Image: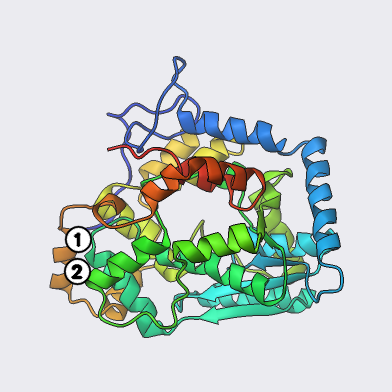
Amino acid sequence: MTLTLKGTDLSARKVCARCIYDEGVRGIEFDAGGVCSFCRMVDGLKAQYETGTPAGERRLMAIVEEIRRAGKGKPYDCVVGVSGGTDSSYLVAKALEWGLRPLAAHYDNTWNTAIATENIRKVLGRLKVDLYTHVIDNKEADDIIRSFFLASVPDLDSATDIALAETLYRAASKYGVRYILEGHSFVAEGVSPLGALYMDGQYIASVHRRFGRLPMRTYPNMPFAAFMKWTLFKRIRKVRPLWYIAYSKSDAREFLEREFDWQYYGGHHLENRITAFHHSYYNPVKFGIDNRNNSLSASVRAGIMSRDEALRIYAAPPYMEPDLLPYFKKRLELTDAEFDRVMALPPKTFRDYPTYKRRFERLRPLFYLLAKSNLVPMSFYLKYCRKSTA
């Protein structure tokens, strides 16, 4: 029998005194005042990047000037990843406002909602920004997702994140661009704990090799050698402008709706159907991981929402399109019995499959230097290069 969605009950767990992360989050620690280590991590990032202050704005404008200088004589001076979501759509508009000449890049995993596709068209069309797209064969995309489902791990959609990163690097390399802008805000979204999502190129390849049925021919994976090529040798820098400036997701959404007839898709991660299924059904039901705690906790820290309101929302089931579960089964060629059998399998994690995790840990000093130089995101260093816990 197919399992059903439930809310998250935190009444029997220790919960952070400041946000809504609880003791079930992997790697969490609480100080004497009951504040969790993730709140302290966010505080550290705000201090490091001077987020939302005039000093943070000045630092970003200095980076923008570097981007302009590095891009002189080229058709584009930066690459911006776009998904049709709030943050990436807003960032394209801001890049133009700052006097940059962005190339938008998109990885199409063939699970986009019609709303996301239209949002990309509306924003880029109005702004006259060119689009570089990598489209995977849809059968191959489904086979990779099916492999992660059969592997019984919570990282169902991690292949999309790796492929997007590789697509951005390929677009930058093709046009001689030295800078990639990413629309992530740790203030608005938090920094998701390791264990809620893991991804690397070896993990993708090893899971697919064990459970896949089709060869990976059109999927843009990123093996370690490629990662080093982009970061160490090509020295393509990643910048997250929203880490420096005051950013409100609701204000950004209002701006997009007013200026571009952009349409909201209902919630964080819901612009792509596999990502929506991953976060709204698969992780909460099979693993007890409700990824809404990231954005809800971020809203509480930012004073956008009260802690009580966040806990009330978290206690209710996540929203999911009524037809998304049958759509998932149909696309992945799963009978009801097969789906229920896999959902009932004991949960596993990335630690049960070959990954680059220990290599990242061994090379922690190198990745610290790369993070300080914006060659890898600081969040990558904080999450992936620390020693694994059991």
Q: Is residue 128 visible?
A: yes
Q: Is residue 270 visible?
A: no
Label 2 residue SS: helix
In the picture, which quadrant includes the N terminus? bottom left
Residue occupying the point 38% across, 54% down: 356
Q: Which mark is residue 84?
A: none
From the viewer's perspective, tell me whether residue 7 is left or right of residue 72: left
From the viewer's perspective, tell me whether residue 277 is left or right of residue 299: left
- The type of residue carrying mark 1 is Met
Residue occupying the point 80% across, 59% down: 67
Give above or below for 173 relative to 275.
Answer: below
Camera-side residue: 305 or 348?
Answer: 348
- The type of residue carrying mark 2 is Phe
**Residue farthest front in this picture:** 233
Does the CB distance between marks 2 and 1 fall below 8 Å?
A: yes
Query: Residue 187's x, y, as percent?
Result: 61, 42
Residue occupying the point 21% across, 76% down: 334
Residue occupying the point 50% across, 38% down: 297
Label 1 residue SS: helix
Give above or below for 47 relative to 277.
Answer: above
Q: How is the image coloured?
A: rainbow
Give above or below for 161 relative to 242.
Answer: below
State the CA–CA distance, disc 2 to disc 1: 6 Å
Camera-side residue: 27 or 267?
Answer: 27
- Label 2 neighbour load within 10 Å: few <14, some 14-19, many 20+: some
Q: Which residue is mark 1?
A: 343
Query: Residue 154's x, y, as percent?
Result: 31, 55
From the viewer's perspective, tell me whether residue 235 is left or right of residue 8: right
Q: Which mark is residue 339?
A: 2
